[in-house]
Amino acid sequence: MDDLTALIKAEIKRQYKSIRRFSAEIDVPQSTIISAMRKGVSGTAFETVLKMCNALDIKLSVNGSVFMDREKSELLSAFSQLDEIGKHTVKTVCSVETLRCKNVPLMTIVNAALEKKKNTSNHDK
């Protein structure tokens, strides 16, 4: 299942609880939505995919890939309200967590952070 189909399916479940309710809300036949969820939205009419995404508050980029969902939008909004220290802190935590999720050993993460700090300190001099 492609990322956009998976996101649409998850958002329908989260926001509407059932395809039937979602279908009635956006006035698209239930069979069309079921087919799109089963086969992937790439074979579904663009207007229908756009209608589903708009109803679910999923934004698309020009090439059709997922650009931003509600969670990413909320994070971006919160991030934009931070000062430089807060932004630096969030970026650092995000970098560390990304490495952790990739199963990078903790000492490698710590050493990389120390090296980055050292390079930043040397650059500021």
Image: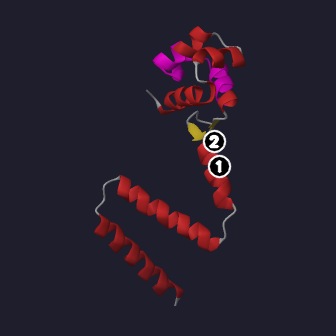
**Residue 53 percent across, percent down from the top left:** 64, 29
Nearest the camera: 35 or 78? Answer: 78
| Residue hosting label 1 | 74
Task: Work out whether 53 lies above or below 75.
Answer: above
Q: Secondary structure at mark 1?
A: helix
Q: Please give the name of the residue rendered at 69% of the width and 30% of the height, measured from the top-left corner.
A: 54
Residue at 61% over, 14% down:
20
Pinpoint residue 47: horizontal percent, then vertical percent.
67, 21
Relative depth, front residue between 24 and 58: 24
* Residue type beneath disc 2: Arg
Magenta stretch?
A: 35-53
Please determine whether, in this image, residue 104 is positioned above or below residue 15.
below
Q: Looking at the rendered structure, which numbered label has been put on residue 33?
A: none
Q: In the rendered image, which residue does mark 2 sit on?
A: 70
Residue 39 colored magenta? yes
Mark 2 falls on what kind of element? helix
Q: Residue 98: horizontal and vertical position, in percent?
A: 42, 56
| Disc 1 residue type (three-letter) | Glu
Q: Quadrant of residue 117?
A: bottom left
Asked if marks 1 and 2 touch (Cβ < 8 Å), the reply is yes
Q: Kindly indicate the quadrant of the structure image that contains residue 57.
A: top right
Q: Is residue 45 magenta?
A: yes
Q: Is residue 21 above or below residue 86?
A: above
Dominant secondary-structure state across the stretch colored magenta: helix
